[in-house]
Amino acid sequence: MKIDDAAARLEALGNPTRLKIYRTLVRAGRAGMPVGRLQERLKIPASTLSHHVKGLVAVGLISQVREGTTLVCHAEYDTMQGLVDFLVAECCVDEKECTPTQTAA
Amino acid sequence: MKIDDAAARLEALGNPTRLKIYRTLVRAGRAGMPVGRLQERLKIPASTLSHHVKGLVAVGLISQVREGTTLVCHAEYDTMQGLVDFLVAECCVDEKECTPTQTAA
DNA sequence: ACCGTATTTCTAGAATATTCGAAATATGAA
DNA sequence: TTCATATTTCGAATATTCTAGAAATACGGT
């Protein structure tokens, strides 16, 4: 994952409202959850909710599938895993640069 | 971790400049890296760098220790792990709500 | 074609973030 | 105490984000 993509995803998750949406969808699992149900649960005005959902879709953290008149949202687990991997990647690889007398823990 | 703390940390990581700072420190490991070296590496004006470092310190993602005239920054690995754990926690626990005919994967 | 429900798009004001030069502060050395 | 280096704080311009009401669109049913 490129650093700008990671930053965009982290920024998307960095808003409390969006994070609540995302966490609700992560808990919802493969079944996902329609926008309308998210609205009931989180008590967010429809336009605000739609705006934030759009942001999460734009960075690939969630996806939407239309089922009749409702739009069901799903957390994209691969993207989440990629983001988590990005955060911990290459941890300590430059450690020797500053402490030549110590070996890795 | 409370959701607002998680959101604040994700927001801190969601800025490309701050994410570069953070990733550099994660790679630097326990040895950490002084602000001045971060500045050389990332080519960021001192005041901008200081501003962003302050943001990362404020949410507990990094810490600073003075060594003489330099301030050495360290990634706080426990905070990172806590954040990662938060993101994946309770994954799919509500899955049954929407798909009563399916069992968990 | 028309209606009702679901959801998005439009719009705009308020709030917040980003950037960085200049000035201020901190530390250790001479 | 004076200096040099390291870093932060101040201040201000610019840009972006957040929020939500109102209007528009999408879909399935009648």
Image (cartoon, coloured by chain):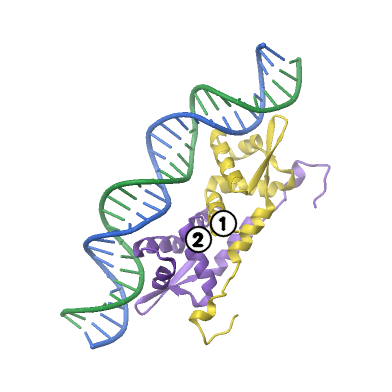
Chain colours: A yellow, B purple, C blue, D green
Residue sitting at 48 percent across and 57 percent down? B16
Which quadrant does the C terminus of chain A fall into? bottom right
Q: Which mark is residue B19?
A: 2
Q: Amino acid at mark 2?
A: Leu
What is the distance, in whole Å, between disc 1 and disc 2 at their CAs? 9 Å
Q: Secondary structure at mark 1?
A: helix
**Label 1 close to label 2 by CB (< 8 Å):** yes
B54 with respect to A51 (left or right): left
Q: Residues within 10 Å of mark 2 (few under 14, many from 20)?
A: many
Residue highlighted by disc 1: A6
Residue A92: quarter of image: bottom right
* Any part of residue B90 in sight: no
Residue at 55% from the left image edge and 38% from the top image edge: A51
> Residue B81, relative to residue B99: is it above or below?
below
Pick the front one: A100 or B2: A100
Task: Pinpoint residue B85: horizontal percent, then vertical percent.
Answer: 63, 60
Question: Which element type, helix, strand or loop, lies under badge 2?
Answer: helix
